[in-house]
């Protein structure tokens, strides 16, 4: 059989189905782009913030560890400061004692230089700037020589006080017991006495 197309040629064209999208305006495209950029920016900001938070947490851990080690160092430094202060206090006490000892040595040295023959000392007391001496001799002349020698000394003041002279007896021997108060020059007590 033979097919014959009796339809006009216009109707022969096959119709294709077209799918068309609704018209999209420029505002919708711009809004979509802004939304997309905002989402990307939010994602980027969150990632950056998370990284910063992680870095800060790591730094806090590191600083906490360092702080703990520094607290130990601080305790050691405080202990060393306390030891240093104790040591300095002891050194100051030793310096005062040494100065006092040097003064005592100087006073005793001057006493021994001033002490004539046939005069002996029974006791010696140094308090402040006053020296109290108790001694004995066979004669008033020897005691007078002792007082003159003390007055000539650069350590003692010239205002020597003879408190008493009395006759004492020990066994069959008689002697004169005396007591003196001898002021020490103030400059001697305030200056260091090293090198004498």
Image (spheres, rainbow, N blue to C red):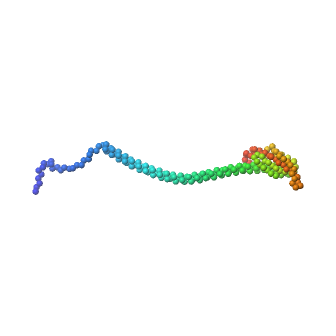
Q: Residue at x 43, y 50 (%)?
A: 50
Quadrant placement of the N terminus: bottom left
Looking at the picture, how far across and down is residue 158, in whole percent?
A: 81, 43
Looking at the picture, how far across and down is residue 83, in whole percent?
A: 63, 52
Residue farthest along the left direction in this orientation: 1
Residue farthest along the bottom direction in this orientation: 1
Looking at the picture, how far across and down is residue 56, in whole percent?
A: 47, 50
Q: Residue at x 10, y 55 (%)?
A: 2
Residue farthest along the right direction in this orientation: 172
| Closer-to-camera residue (61/169) | 169
> In the visual, does 73 lie left or right of 146?
left
> In the visual, does 108 lie left or right of 20?
right
Can residue 194 be seen in the rendering of this structure? Answer: no
Q: Residue at x 31, y 44 (%)?
A: 28
Looking at the picture, how far across and down is residue 181, in whole percent?
A: 80, 46
> In the visual, does 156 lie left or right of 10?
right
How many numbered marks appear? Answer: 0
Can residue 193 be seen in the rendering of this structure? Answer: yes
Q: Residue at x 78, y 49 (%)?
A: 125
């Amino acid at each position: 059989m033979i097919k014959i197309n009796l339809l006009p040629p216009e109707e022969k064209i096959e119709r294709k189905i077209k799918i068309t999208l609704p018209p999209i305006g420029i505002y919708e495209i711009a809004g979509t782009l802004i939304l997309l950029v905002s989402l990307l920016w939010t994602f980027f900001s969150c990632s950056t913030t998370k990284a910063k938070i992680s870095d800060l947490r790591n730094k806090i851990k590191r600083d906490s560890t360092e702080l703990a080690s520094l607290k130990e160092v601080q305790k050691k430094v405080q202990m060393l400061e306390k030891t240093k202060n104790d040591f300095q206090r002891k050194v100051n006490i030793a310096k005062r004692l040494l100065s006092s000892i040097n003064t005592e040595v100087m006073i005793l040295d001057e006493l021994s230089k001033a002490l004539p023959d046939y005069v002996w000392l029974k006791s010696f007391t140094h308090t402040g700037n006053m020296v109290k001496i108790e001694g004995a001799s066979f004669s008033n002349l020897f005691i007078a020589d002792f007082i003159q020698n003390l007055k000539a000394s650069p350590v003692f003041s010239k205002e020597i006080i003879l408190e008493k002279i009395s006759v004492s007896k020990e066994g069959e021997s008689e002697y004169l017991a005396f007591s003196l108060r001898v002021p020490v020059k103030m400059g001697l007590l305030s200056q260091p006495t090293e090198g004498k």
